[in-house]
Image (tube, rainbow, N blue to C red):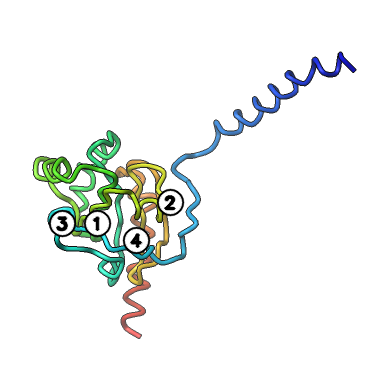
């Protein structure tokens, strides 16, 4: 019996090793979202640019859009920012920013210096909306249909490859659906 007890740490070590080995093959960008197929959570948060004005989830309905969670403290957000600026100039889809757990003055300063790709910018100082969306960190990007339903979530910075291969085809499909619905 004492000899079997000596093998317990070895068995635990091997079990943990197998568990961690499997984790090496998970893609952190492909996080499941409990909200895919569900409406944007209800919220009333300040506009980044003006603390006396508010946005709600109703302000994000009406057209297919991209919601981008970002912050000035986020290095990956700085990496994706030039790409978001290019998308904004192309005007293919509105981009709504969710400034996540950040300093308002720093965020406004950064957008003035680097450019503002966001059609609307929500100030989520406490991270309440981010928490309701299931955000793990910044940046995260959500594709939302014209009815305010979250259709896709992408964790990490977006770039040309991700846009062309994954996000834009889905946006085009949702825009076509919205046109068909509007024509009916």
- Camera-near label (2 vs 4) is 2
From mark 1 to mark 4, how far is it between C-alphas?
12 Å
Labelled pair 4, 3 in contact (Cβ < 8 Å):
no
Q: Position of residue 152 (x, y in %)?
A: 42, 57
From mark 3 to mark 2, how far is it between C-alphas?
24 Å
From mark 4 to mark 3, how far is it between C-alphas?
31 Å
Sequence-earlier tag: 2 or 4: 2
Q: Which residue is mark 3?
A: 51
Bin the neighbour count of mark 2 within 10 Å (Cα to Cα): few under 14, some 14-19, many 20 and up: some
Q: Position of residue 157 (x, y in %)?
A: 33, 41
Q: Which residue is mark 4?
A: 171
Q: Which residue is mark 1?
A: 95
Q: Quadrant of residue 118?
A: bottom left
Q: Is residue 3 left or right of residue 179?
A: right
Specify the quadrant that holds the N terminus. top right
Q: Which residue is mark 2?
A: 134
From mark 1 to mark 2, how far is it between C-alphas?
19 Å
């Amino acid at each position: 019996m004492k000899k079997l007890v000596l093998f317990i740490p070895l068995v635990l070590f091997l079990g943990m090793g197998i568990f961690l080995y499997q984790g090496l093959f998970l893609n952190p960008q492909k996080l499941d979202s409990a909200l895919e197929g569900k409406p944007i959570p209800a919220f009333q948060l300040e506009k980044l640019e003006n603390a006396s004005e508010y946005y709600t989830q109703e302000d994000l309905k009406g057209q297919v859009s991209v919601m981008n969670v970002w912050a000035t403290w986020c290095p990956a957000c700085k990496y994706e920012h030039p790409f978001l600026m290019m998308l904004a100039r192309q005007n293919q889809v509105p981009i709504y920013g969710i400034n996540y757990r950040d300093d308002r003055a720093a965020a406004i300063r950064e957008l003035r210096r680097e450019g503002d790709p966001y059609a609307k910018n929500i100030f989520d100082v406490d991270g309440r909306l981010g928490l309701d969306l299931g955000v793990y960190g910044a940046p995260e990007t959500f594709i939302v249909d014209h009815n305010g339903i979250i259709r896709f979530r992408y964790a990490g910075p977006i770039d040309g490859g991700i846009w062309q291969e994954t996000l834009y085809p889905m946006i085009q499909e949702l825009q076509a659906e919205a046109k068909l619905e509007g024509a009916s």
